[in-house]
């Protein structure tokens, strides 16, 4: 299996990197869809975590009023943030879309509980729609765009033990 280290192109996105694994014979279409899906889920967790942390830290009296709710929310948040952190790359752990979705569901559940207690006051559906901006992204490797319709082996050969770094760039970006 080819180990793909995926990084976002933007300098401020240093936290947005993860490992993906595929066969060298995988189509670029399949890879792009899977990688962009994982990237979108990772981005969603990171933006949700940022918003929750801002709300939690903004008013510590809320955490004192509902310690059980605050603790459960912080625990779910910590688990999700740890799972999507760039430290997973250093430990050679691959992100799974299923695990990412499970972390999102866990966070959403804890947010709903917190909202029912008056602990948090933001709109989850609005957050979900804010994360749908990954459609115009392209995969780049070694200064070349990985073109849909081709296979990964057209670029890297058929060695299954290859490790590559792919950069996610907006489609209007040039090499």
Image (cartoon, rainbow, N blue to C red):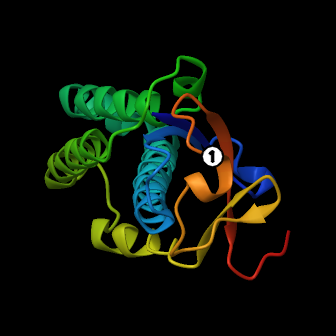
Examine the rendering and report whether any part of residue 91 can be seen.
yes
Q: Nearer the viewer, residue 6 or 25?
A: 25
Secondary structure found at label 1: loop
Q: Is residue 84 left or right of residue 96?
A: right
Q: Nearer the viewer, residue 16 or 155?
A: 155
Residue 138 rendering spot, x and y as whole percentages: 63, 69
Residue at the image position 45 percent from the left and 60 percent from the top: 40
Is residue 74 found left or right of 66 in the rendered image? Answer: right
Give the residue at the far front of this rendering: 158
Image side of residue 15 versus residue 65, left or right:
right
Q: Quadrant of the C terminus?
A: bottom right
Image quarter where the N terminus lies is top left
x%, y% of residue 141?
72, 54
Q: Is residue 96 toward the left or the right of residue 68 in the image? A: right
Q: Residues within 10 Å of mark 1 (few under 14, many from 20)?
A: few
Please state the horizontal and vertical placement of residue 8, each as a whole percent of the image. 67, 53
Asked if residue 7 can be seen in this view, the reply is: no
Q: Which residue is mark 1?
A: 157
Say which quarter of the image contains residue 30. Answer: bottom left
Is 43 in front, or is 61?
43
- Tell me the residue at 19%/26% (across/down): 68
Q: Residue at x 22, y 33 (%)?
A: 66
Q: Is residue 130 above or below residue 172?
A: above
Tell me: residue 15, above or below residue 91: below
Q: Residue at x 52, y 71 (%)?
A: 134
Q: What number of labels is visible?
A: 1
Tell which residue pokes out farthest to the top in this image.
Answer: 91
Residue 159, x across and y down, in percent:
57, 35
């Amino acid at each position: 299996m080819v180990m793909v280290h995926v990084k976002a192109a933007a300098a401020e996105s240093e936290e947005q990197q993860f490992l993906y694994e595929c066969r060298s014979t995988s189509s670029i279409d399949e890879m792009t869809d899977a990688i962009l899906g994982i990237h979108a889920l990772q981005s969603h967790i990171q933006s949700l975590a940022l918003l929750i942390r801002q709300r939690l830290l903004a008013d510590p009296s809320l955490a004192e009023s509902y310690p059980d709710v605050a603790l459960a929310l912080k625990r779910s948040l910590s688990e999700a943030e740890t799972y999507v952190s760039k430290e997973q790359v250093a430990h050679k752990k691959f992100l799974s879309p299923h695990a990412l979705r499970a972390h999102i569901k866990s966070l959403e559940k804890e947010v709903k509980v917190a909202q029912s207690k008056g602990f948090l006051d933001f709109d989850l559906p609005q957050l979900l729609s804010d994360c749908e901006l990954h459609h115009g992204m392209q995969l780049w490797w070694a200064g070349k765009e990985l073109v849909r319709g081709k296979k990964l082996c057209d670029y890297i050969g058929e060695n299954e033990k290859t490790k590559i770094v792919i950069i996610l760039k907006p489609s209007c970006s040039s090499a």
